[in-house]
Amino acid sequence: MHSRIAIVAAALLALAAAPISSRAQVAPDQMTSYKLGAPAPHWAYIFDSPSSVPQVSKVFILDTDAQKMLGQLNGGYLASFVAAPDASELYMVGTFYSRAWHGTRTDAVEIFDAHTLEFKSEVKIPPKRLLIVPKDNSAAVTSDGRFMLIANMTPATSVSVVDLKSRKFVDEIETPGCVQVLVSGARKFSSMCADGSILTVNLDDAGKLKSRKQSKPFFDPSKDPVFDQPAIVGTTAYFDSYHGMIYKVDLSGDEAVAEPGWSALSDEDNKANWRPGGWQTISATAGGSVYLLMHQGGEWTHKQTGKEVWVLDAAKKTRVGRITLKTEAYSVRASAGPKPILEALAIIQSQLETYSLPDGKYIGVYRNLGVPFLIYGP
Amino acid sequence: MDKIDQLFEHLTRVIAQRTSRRSFLARLGKLAVGGMIIPLLPVDRVTASARAQILTTLPPGAPVPAGMEAMAKHGDPNDDSACDYWKYCAIDGYLCSCCGGGSHDCPPGASPSPTSWVGTCKHPGDGKDYIVSYRDCCGKTPCGRCLCTNTEGELPLYRAQKDSDLIWCFGAPTMVYHCSTAEIVGVK
């Protein structure tokens, strides 16, 4: 027995002493967690809508230039994702039941460090937040990053205000007959109303209601409704309608002011049944280019995936280009920055395709993104 | 204002047929905020025809992939596990009849939502138009089976009464959506 142990020990010693190769020994690994740098214009935040277990939401953070996955953020039931304007924090506004799918309901704004993606703190809000298949403008931050605004529906409509500086819930502002939060300033947001008008709310420096004014209706929801996820650039909102009308709305004042709408469709386009459609159907850049996700389908096909993106000049009120997508998309977004690219999300194929602008040249594809519904940028 | 009145009339008629006056008033009180009646529930959600689409893996609100419509069970208006079932003309969601429930009954352990939207469907036998209340079953995670998506007549969120992307579990023990049913309320 002793001799067998001696033989094994000798063999182990020989192995330990023998060089694996002529090179130096591999150093032991040091396990860490990566940190993120400052976000680049071509980063994309992609909301994966978990269909079977929506109690946990997921956002992928992707560098579309490097075609690299950077990380993931989690939130509660049918959460809303929001990024701080100064890129220091990321937020998930979620709903939680104490026993996952039953028990006591808690709604909270969860605050994450944008560099470590670690959970920092939370602010509880009234358990009234809008619960819907994830949509843009369900929650938003004021342009100075001070207040978080959360759309409520019980089904009475209101907006909860959270002071992100003091980390406290401030107040609930009633928005009768109007929903969502379209932010257009440091103390200002607008909501879309059932009669085709817009309610604009001004806050004071404490986040309390200062004034509230409803515009005149600028479209007829029963004849040609606009989609409820407009493109917002600064204080300008671009709305697209089921029939391809484009409305430019100035949200800078105490009352929203809409310019007369114009059609993105020619008579030929109409005859060929071209329509906007999908989930995020419209995007815009600071230069006044508007991107519209289009398909051929006719009436009541407003959720059909799009095979083209039409490039519109908002100032000249005309179409200036057409981009044919390799894969039909459900959501599109033009990135910000000096060299915008077009990002097209294909929900069925679970992928993101990118195209250069303005020429619409295909750049590449990133796959395995769950059931991607929404796309945001830094 | 006419539209609001019409919606309110629907709300009165449909809820009154299902519930006692006392509980109706209690519920109405919950919907009245700041003196305003919320013209949300339930409402006329008339659709001319159901385009049957049946999927098993995508969430409500998702588009139907090209080529996948062949999966739908077409043509049998008496099969309540098919999107073509006559009462489902305006349904949007997972069919409870594929999840352990029935066309107007929840699966075991799931709670019927007291709120709903309303459609009008033509019975293929007697040719009459029936008012159908689409009530969700709530309190379990999404069933994920037999997704029927019909976007005809569907409006955006600011017309919430016709937005099928909302979680219609208002008034149920939890806002966790499980599946959808269709309940005949009466003849139009």
Image (cartoon, coloured by chain):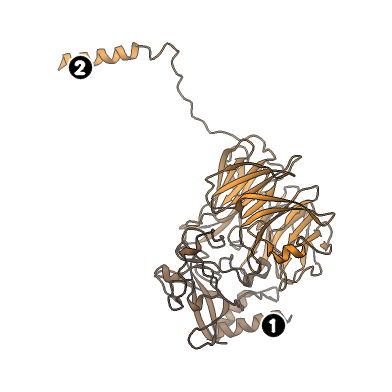
Camera-nearest residue between A315 and A158? A315
Left or right: where A43 falls relative to A290: left
Looking at the image, is A51 positioned above or below residue A90? below
What tint does the image give chain B?
brown
Left or right: where B32 falls relative to B122: right
Instruction: Say few, some or many: other residues with alpha carbon within 10 Å of mark 2 (under 14 / 14 to 19 / 20 or more).
Output: few
Relative image position of residue A68 (x, y in whole percent): 58, 37
Residue B26's image quarter?
bottom right
> Which residue, as the protein is rendered here, is positioned at the far left?
A1
Do the residues at pointers 2 and 1 share their chain? Answer: no
**Quarter of the figure with the C terminus of chain A:** top right
Q: Name the residue tied to disc 1.
A: B5
Q: Secondary structure at mark 1?
A: helix
Camera-nearest residue between A238 and A182? A238
The circle on residue A80 is none
Chain in orange (letter): A
Q: Name the residue tied to disc 2.
A: A5
